[in-house]
Amino acid sequence: MSATNAPIDAAGFCADLVRSRDFARYAATLFMPAIPRRALLAVYAFNTEISRVREQVSQPLPGEMRLQWWTDMLGGTGHGGIEGNPVAAELLLAIRDFRLPVEPLLRLIEEHQFDLYNDPMPSMAALEGYVTDTSSALLSLGARLVARPSEQIDHLARHAGLAQGIAQVIAALPRDAARRQLFVPVQLLESHGSGMEEVYAGKQTPGTRAAIDQLVGEARAHLATAFELLAGVPPEARPVFLPLALVRRDLQRLSRADTDHFVPQPTSRLRTLWTLWRASRSGRFGG
């Protein structure tokens, strides 16, 4: 059964879910060809479902059960049919039609178990592992929809995902601090004379600012490497990495001395679309 023969309402459901919950990724798919775009939206919808489990439960155990459902579904065990879950149906079609590996999807689920608990991110190594198996994995899977897998593309996806994921950690700081969840590594905070309680208080101090500035620097270094690598991958793979244009914009804002990282900084959808459109016309991301 091909992706084009699947029920169109499942595809529409995935598109609506990503548009409402992860507009930046949704907007970037608008610059993709229709068939791989549908599969990419299925992958992104799956990511959205996994990422929002924390918001849907009040205790870790129900969250673990929800994540286990997805693990079992991908493993082909239990739960019977998936007719009532359009995201699962679309994801399985994408896996089948594009021969996507299941292992990265399973690792993504496993990493998001961290979200269910209030244990702080311990170190930069732990954060990089988390981001590699989440943000980087999504870009690598997306590239498989349009180009043959290669070490070059995976290398690019790793650095691109690290830049994107670290920027998202900083952008989500107001929300995470309010619910006493910490993705900024404790080890990094302590190296600058700060700690968890300063972050949970939601007020920028010299220590928290220095730690976040170091994170911004790490993200910018990964972004620079990603842009260098982008020119060396097949042209058909480059549109998948269009979100890097948004990462560059966000890191420029996060680097400003007058930015308070504990104050939400929403970006309009129109500005997001404008940034992506300009980047798509630049030739750097051309397919």
Image (cartoon, rainbow, N blue to C red):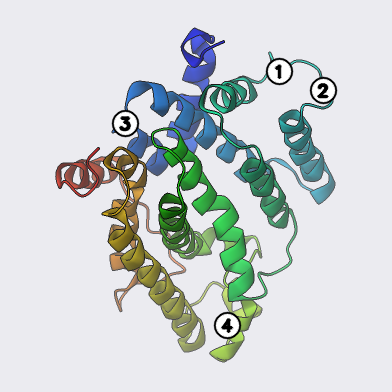
- Residue 98 in the image, given as x and y percentages of width and height: 51, 27
Residue named by callout 2: 79
Q: Residue at x 63, y 76 (%)?
A: 123
- Left/right placement of residue 170 relative to residue 81 reads left
Q: Which image quarter is the C terminus in? A: top left
Distance between the alpha carbons at the discs numbered 1 and 2: 8 Å
Label 4: how many residues lie within 10 Å, few (<14), some (14-19) or many (20+)? many
Distance between the alpha carbons at the discs numbered 3 and 4: 38 Å
- Residue 167 in the image, given as x and y percentages of width and height: 43, 62
Q: Is residue 91 above or below residue 223?
A: above
Q: Residue at x 22, y 41 (%)?
A: 286
Which numbered disc covers residue 82? 1
Q: Earlier in the sequence, mark 2 or mark 3?
A: 3
**Closer to the eye: label 3 or 4:** 3
Residue type marked 4: Leu
Residue type marked 3: Leu
Residue named by callout 3: 30
